[in-house]
Amino acid sequence: MTENSSEAMTPEAHLAEVLAAYDNSPNPRLAEITKALIRHLHEFVVEVGLTREEWFAGIEALTRTGQMCDEQRQEFILLSDTIGVSMLVEMINHVAAEGSTEPTVFGPFHVEGAPHRAMGNSIITDSMEDDQEVTYAGRVLGLDGNPIEGATLDVWETASNGSYDVQDGGQTPMNMRGIFTTGSDGAYEIQGIRPVPYQIPGDGPAGDLLFENGRHNWRPGHMHFVVAAADHKTVITHLFDATSDYLDSDAVFGVRDSLVVDMSGDRCDYDFVLETVSEN
Ligand code: BEZ
Ligand code: FE
């Protein structure tokens, strides 16, 4: 279809014309992504019969999403999390080998440069009245069952008020964070607290989309782990409290059965199993 054609333009012909405009891209991967995005967006507009007002409401919501982003706040990631896209990207990029620890969402509250702490030490800098202390313990193993020496566990959780240090001016920076390194037995032991369910930020467009669709913004109680070792694939994951509320309705779809563990006592046992880099 050309601009001068006398035939009536249809949505299909318009899509074909738009896609053809990207045929000569010098970047094949960018062209593939751009064209698929255009195709899906055009199909979406036709499928829902998007009105001008709805199109503009979408533009405004995305504008506000960008305006809310800064060093501390990443509203686009939150939006991606709450519509399940972050988890989908994780799923297709990290197909966990049978027996290895499943990954889940990274989330926006990891902080670079957490303190290295001696094995067995506590991540609690600021104790709170409701803290229920738990020892997280186990080993970091390869798929062959052998312990991994020198593996690092970068961990973070909210304080028992449901806030991360970076969200809460009342907490000492790096409260509830730490990096632990395994010895030759691959064992780890970390003193923390039993995690509490908490609400992800709900005061922006991601929250609006949740609440206006009748969803809530709670996550079940969890401890975050990034477990890394030389020659092994890094796993970004959580352990979830088996008795927590919201396991069936996590706002960001991060729960995996294999990551739900008993935290009801004063000890939580879990072995992390890493794939070697070549075991793709
Ligand atoms: C978190 O678990 O820290 C998190 C994950 C996704 C969105 C918001 C928070
Ligand atoms: Fe979290």
Image (tube, rainbow, N blue to C red):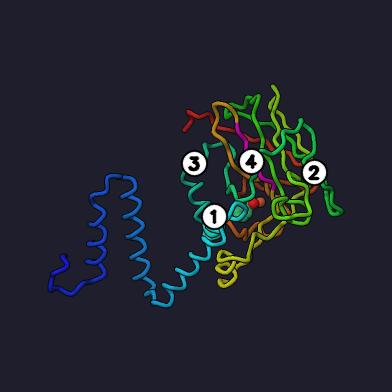
Element at badge 3?
A: loop
- Residue matched to label 2: 124
Q: From the image, state whether disc 3 or disc 2 is nearer to you.
A: 2
Q: CA distance from mark 3 to mark 4?
A: 26 Å
Q: Position of residue 37 (x, y in %)?
A: 36, 57
The span picked out in magenta is: 223-228
Q: Main secondary structure of the magenta part?
A: strand
Q: From the image, state whether disc 4 or disc 1 is nearer to you.
A: 4
Mark 4 or mark 2, which is nearer the start of the sequence? Answer: 4
Residue 279 visible in the current orientation: yes
Answer few, some or many: residues within 10 Å of disc 1's Cα (few below 14, many 20 plus, some between 14 and 19): some
Circle 3: residue type:
Val
Mark 3 or mark 1, which is nearer the start of the sequence? Answer: 1
Q: Is residue 151 above or below residue 105?
A: above
Circle 1: residue type:
Ile
In the rendered structure, the answer to whether residue 119 lies left or right of residue 64 reads right
Q: CA distance from mark 2 to mark 1?
A: 28 Å
Residue 12 sits inside the magenta stretch: no
- Residue matched to label 3: 95
Q: How many marks?
A: 4
Element at badge 1?
A: helix
Please tell me which residue is depicted at 42% across the width and 77% down the height of the picture: 53
Q: From the image, state whether disc 3 or disc 4 is nearer to you.
A: 4
- Find out whether the residues at labels 3 and 2 contact each other: C-beta distance under 8 Å: no
